[in-house]
Amino acid sequence: MENTGKPQPNNASTGEKVDENSKKRQLEQFQEEPKDQYMTTDQGVRISHTDDSLKAGFRGPTLMEDFHFREKMTHLDHESIPERVVHARGSGAHGYFQVYEPQTHLTKAQFLQDPSVKTPVFVRFSTVVGSRGSADTVRDVRGFATKFYTQEGNYDLVGNNMPVFFIQDSIKFPDLVHAIKPMPDNEMPQASAAHDTFWDFASLMPETAHMLMWVLSDRAVPRSFRMMEGFGVHTFRLVNAEGKGTFVKFHWKPLLGVHSLVWDEAQKLAGKDPDWLRRDLWEAIEMGDYVEFELGIQAIPEEDEHSFAFDILDATKLIPEELVPVKRIGKMTLNRNPDNFFAETEQVAFHPGNVVPGIDFTNDPLLQGRLFSYVDTQINRFSSANFTEVPINRPVVPVHNQHGAGFMRQTISKGKVNYFPNSLGGGYPKMASEQEGGYVHYTEKVEGHKVRERSKSFKDYFSQATLFWNSMSAGEKKRIVQALHFELGKVDSKEVRMRMVNEILNNINHELATMVAEGIGVEAPSGAIVSKVKDAAGSIKDKVAHSLSPGKTVEDSPSLSIDRNNKSNAIKSRKVAVLVDNGFAFKEVMSIKQALKAQGAQATIVSMFKGKLKSADGEELEVDKSHITTGSIMYDAVFVPGGKESIEKLKKQGDALHFINEAFKHGKPIGAINEGVDLLLASSISQLVTVASDDQQGKPLTAKGIVTLRNTGDFTAFNEVFLKAIAQHRHIVE
Ligand code: HDD
């Protein structure tokens, strides 16, 4: 499509082939930039003065006829739109998706066929509970919504960074959201689940047990949007050209591995940099560290639908990867930041019901309810069903239909005919056969009585919560217990705390319940739940415990654990703080900077004040961040170069010593060379620092993530060991 600089209606049939830049070109047609231009009114009239309103006399009243004032004010007054009822706070990025091999055997979806096709995408990552201005690093689920602008129309994969959900049936969604959002009387707490109403609800709803384990785990405090997995959650259906259906679970696997913050760090970041995840995503893309996720699928033949020990239509269950491996079928690369937050990230509207031929739904009652909610909520946000015409939401292929009217309709549909069938309009727009790309719903046979009941196969609430707990490393288990001490520790109602321990946690694992009880002032349950009741009416009193039906399952699933399975030892885009003051050793700073750069990581020079520092040999160095504007929580590792004068100064600076102590507390690698080691010895970690004896000169020593080197100018070996320590990410001393 030629870029004419003018908005193009999207109903002009372009015949253009979709490529990586199709969406970019389309958006460019709606962009404006004021360079060399005059300011005008909305009507295009040039403005001569925008600093004073039109008045009768210098001190006189403002005049109604000041159209420029009125217009300027009206726009401000109407600038906000309702924020999303959930997932209000989000960050978006553009990119493209490419399939590795044709998936013809599974689906006819065109964007999953040709490895040479780059399908444009827009992704919005989000937190769920907090409002638009809330902090990024709160304990919460993260949304991971992807809009594929395919050659057959838009396909939205609206997922989360956790593979299961709190509830099984959408009718409970309003209850869940009310319980987890701030309390209705005082709107506290913001962006957090640590309060009575959420835990009251959770303790009465045993189906939440599995999701609770995810939310209490390290997964709920991701280090970066770039370092978390994504999941479609529901079992969807792929359909091939022969009409054969296959159940499918979608996964996004980050190429940087899965990494998390520790809780103390997450809480501090929420104050020091509430935009932590947003900034991380933005800066990575600006610096050319493009964000990569592989799309994985678990394909389950229809014949195997009932072969598992759980119901695959139950969104509180995952299919362990050890049972059905995830096949990576393509890669998404996010390589462009939005130009305008409101126009793109705020106005993008996702909907799990946006599918293309070859992708279909299942009867999962959570998915079915979502199919209603998303358009409904967009109409609340946009006051019109025409939100699909907003540039970010338009498909890159032609749109023709007979909707034609409503608030803010953009397209000018020509002719008299806006109904079907018609002869006066030549019968257009016409229907497409399946071969011509017409969407045909999967012809699943469905029959049954109308009932308001949960399927018996959904009544296993605890088996996968237990599987999750059993699959964690010792450190991950410890952090789950600490998270429960925090979350339930904030619950005033003792009854709710007791119910959580006895009715939920003790059904998951007795040891877990006992450890949690200890920290929240309730009595530990007297024994493990041993009765694995086969079925019940679903009420909590029935204590429905573990698997209800025989079938495939696993006892241990390392893929659920970050520690055991999902980390990556790439240090690309990791940030290392270099603590210095005047008189530092220049060569040591340059050496680490180069070593980090070679592996795609960055060094940030941190000192008491901004400005220029002088090294011991008189070289100048610009400070990137002062202690006032930064902190150890914003880095993945710390390096202290030598330089007698610099270290003597740093030893007297509380901020520098706190930097070291705090980084250690959060398990971050700390490296020091020559006199730099003395700063570590002056900090609270001195006991753990191994100091080279004379015969160890020139050898880097390492323990618990602390790497030191003394009495030498050869830094190669040090850099190697320190970078290895960074690649291990955390060295938490349990
Ligand atoms: Fe939802 C937004 C993901 C269950 C109703 N949801 C929303 C977003 C994501 C998800 C990522 C933000 C999209 C964006 O960035 O604009 N939601 C999920 C997942 C679920 C889920 C993975 C479980 C598998 N959601 C769910 C249920 C319902 C909703 C059961 C209601 C029946 N979700 C909504 C919504 C939102 C939304 C109220 C609010 C803003 C929006 O849709 O656009 O319709």
Image (cartoon, rainbow, N blue to C red):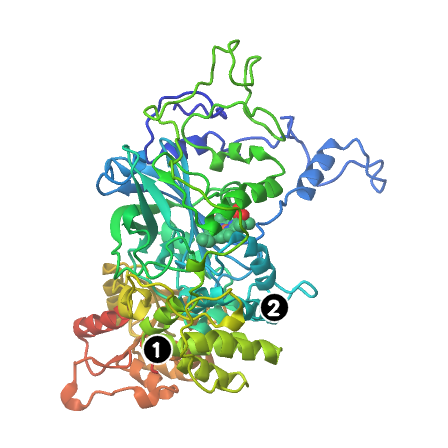
Tell me if I can see residue 54 in this picture.
Answer: yes
Q: Nearer the viewer, residue 367 or 374?
A: 367
User: Image quarter for residue 591?
Assistant: bottom left
**In this rendering, does residue 567 appear at all?**
no
**Residue named by callout 2:** 197
At x 67% / y 39%, what residue is drawn?
75
Relative placement, left or right, of 218 versus 273 is left
x, y percent for residue 438:
38, 27
Q: Secondary structure at mark 2?
A: helix
Tell me, for residue 148, which label it has, or none. none
**Location of residue 9 with respect to 264 vertically, above or below:** above
What residue is shown at x 60% (from left), y 43% (from top)?
A: 381
The answer to whether 371 appears left or right of 119 in the picture is: right
Towards the viewer: 386 or 438? 438
Give the image quarter of residue 479: bottom left
What residue sits right under mark 1 in the picture?
A: 475
Q: How far, Cα to Cα, is label 1 from label 2?
A: 29 Å
Q: Is residue 275 left or right of residue 17?
A: right
Chain-order first, disc 1 or disc 2: 2
Percent position of residue 229, x then y = 35, 57
Give the foreground label among 1 and 2: 2
Which quarter of the picture shows residue 723? bottom left
Amino acid marked by disc 2? Thr
The quadrant of the image that shows the N terminus is top left
Q: Is mark 2 within 8 Å of ligand 1?
A: no
